[in-house]
Amino acid sequence: GPDEEASLMEGVQQLIVDVLGGEDTAIDWSEIHETLKDDVAEYLHKQTRRHPLVIPVMLEV
């Protein structure tokens, strides 16, 4: 339901913050892309018992 979806999105947002927050040196975007894809897929699998297709889209602003 909507509450479960909101909870999943909050968890995914926290994962993204954790992955991006620890970078003090030059950023390797391809490594971050793979890390986010793997970490988010693992998190969603643990929460839903499903194997989602995760496609990170990163935009340079």
Image (cartoon, helix red, strand yellow):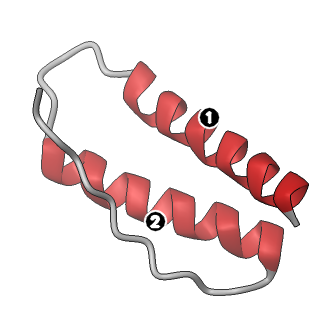
Residue nearest the viewer, comparing 47 with 19: 47
Which of the numbered marks, if any, corresponds to residue 51? none
**Figure check: 33 above or below 54:** above
Mark found first going from the N terminus, 2 or 1: 1
Which residue is denoted by mark 1 in the rendering? Answer: 14
Calculate the distance from the C-alpha at mark 2 to the C-alpha at mark 1. Answer: 14 Å
Cβ–Cβ under 8 Å for marks 2 and 1: no
Q: Circle 2 sits in a helix, a strand or a loop, which is it? A: helix
Residue at position x 41%, y 53% from top?
A: 36
Q: Circle 1 sits in a helix, a strand or a loop, which is it? A: helix
**Figure check: 15 above or below 40:** above
Tally the numbered discs.
Answer: 2
Which residue is denoted by mark 2 in the rendering? Answer: 38
Quadrant of residue 8 within the rendered picture: bottom right
Residue 49 placed where, x, y %? Answer: 79, 83
**Figure check: 58 above or below 54:** above
Residue at position x 44%, y 72% from top?
A: 54
Residue 5 placed where, x, y %? Answer: 76, 58
The C terminus lies in quadrant: top left
Residue at position x 66%, y 49% from top?
A: 9
Residue 28 placed where, x, y %? Answer: 14, 39
What residue type is disc 1 on? Gln
Q: Residues within 10 Å of mark 2 (few under 14, many from 20)?
A: some
Residue at position x 70%, y 40% from top?
A: 10
Residue 39 placed where, x, y %? Answer: 52, 58
Quadrant of residue 55 within the rendered picture: bottom left
What residue type is disc 2 on? Asp
- Whether residue 45 sits left or right of residue 33 in the image: it is right
Residue nearest the viewer, comparing 23 with 50: 50
